Amino acid sequence: MSFLDALILGLIQGLTEFLPVSSSGHLVLGQEVLGVLADDNITFEVFVHFGTLFSILAIFWRDVWQIFSSLFQAVRRPGSIPVLLKEDEHFKLAVLILIGSIPAAVIGLSFKPYVERAFSDVNLVGVMLMITGLVLFLTRLSRPKPDKMVGWGTAIFIGFAQAFAIMPGISRAGMTISAGLFSGVAREQAARYSFLLALPAIFGATLLETFEITGQPIESHFVIALVIGTVAAFVAGYVAIKTIFVVLKKDKFSYFSFYCLAVGLIVILLT
């Protein structure tokens, strides 16, 4: 992997992780075009995932800090949990994130071999991108309410939407934000929950990938490529998150559907 490959793939990962266009699908396509070696892919993906993880933390660090503070209080005083659920917004948010993470964790671990094989099927990526585009387009029919927050039922619905995004070409951000909008959740709240829900998802996926590369030697020139890719993913991820909030505020989220449909169709026709 050259330094330019690392820069390009890092930017792709960071932008597409949070823009509703599927990071997994674009990485498959990017690696196919650049001809990156399969042995390098897993190691590189671990590091760029860390880059996108830190971009979420950089923007939502206050929420993350308050969530962990609330969880620590609940651990210290288990009897206060019912009160915290009613009165502490961030403790309830932590539980909602846990609930929303369960479907992806169960499905991801249960069907891991099948999902891994799907990553080698470029034509399937094209089909999944078109499905993503269709869902994004249908958000035009959603009627989000300015004051509606994510609730228990909505968290489960969004959780299954995230589980569906395990397939390459299905956008995690696209599915989860769309699910929130279809449930009537306020646009900003749907995006906030989607990005915070990404933390355990990205961390869990990164942890599994880390186990796969444990003990494998990394050549010195590849270390520089990893650093370049990670920094690129962090910067691009930060910009992408900020962009999503602007797009949602202007009610133009469905515009991403045209890109997904076009890329998906091109991939299908070329493969």
Image: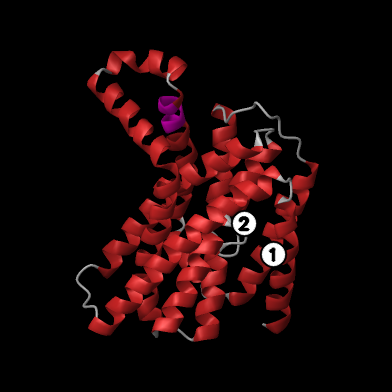
Report x, y in % for residue 60.
Answer: 44, 42
Q: Position of residue 214 (x, y in %)?
A: 23, 67
**Residue drawn 28% across and 23% down?**
73
Q: What crowding class fits label 1: few (fewer than 14 Cα within 10 Å), some (14-19), or many (20 or more)? A: many
Of helix, strand and loop, which one carries label 1? helix
The image shows residue 139 at horizontal and vertical percentages of 74, 46
Which residues are the magenta region? Answer: 90-95
Instruction: Say which quarter of the image contains residue 5.
Output: bottom left
Query: What is the C-alpha distance between the residues marked 2 and 1?
Result: 9 Å
Residue 1 in sight in this render: no
Main secondary structure found in the magenta portion: helix
Q: Nearer the viewer, residue 139 or 112?
A: 139
What amino acid type should be assigned to the residue bearing mark 1? Cys
Residue at the spot x=71%, y=65% of the render?
259
Residue 94 visible, this orientation: yes
Residue closest to the eye, 161 or 186: 186
Where is 174 relative to 141, above or below? below
Q: Is residue 241 left or right of residue 79?
A: right
Query: Can you give x and y, in whole percent of width and height, for residue 117 in the image?
Result: 49, 70
The N terminus - image quarter: bottom left
Is there a contact, CB below 8 Å, between mark 2 and mark 1? yes
Residue that carries the numbered disc 1 in the rendered image: 260
Quadrant of the drawing holding the C terminus: bottom right
Q: Reply yes or no: does residue 54 show up in magenta.
A: no
Query: What residue is shown at x 74% (from left), y 50% (from top)?
Result: 252
**Between discs 2 and 1, the one toward the N terminus:** 2
45 up-or-down from 147: above or below:
below
Left or right, 97 with reference to 138: left
Please tell me the numbered disc located at residue 20. 2
Please tell me in which quadrant of the rendered image residue 90 appears: top left
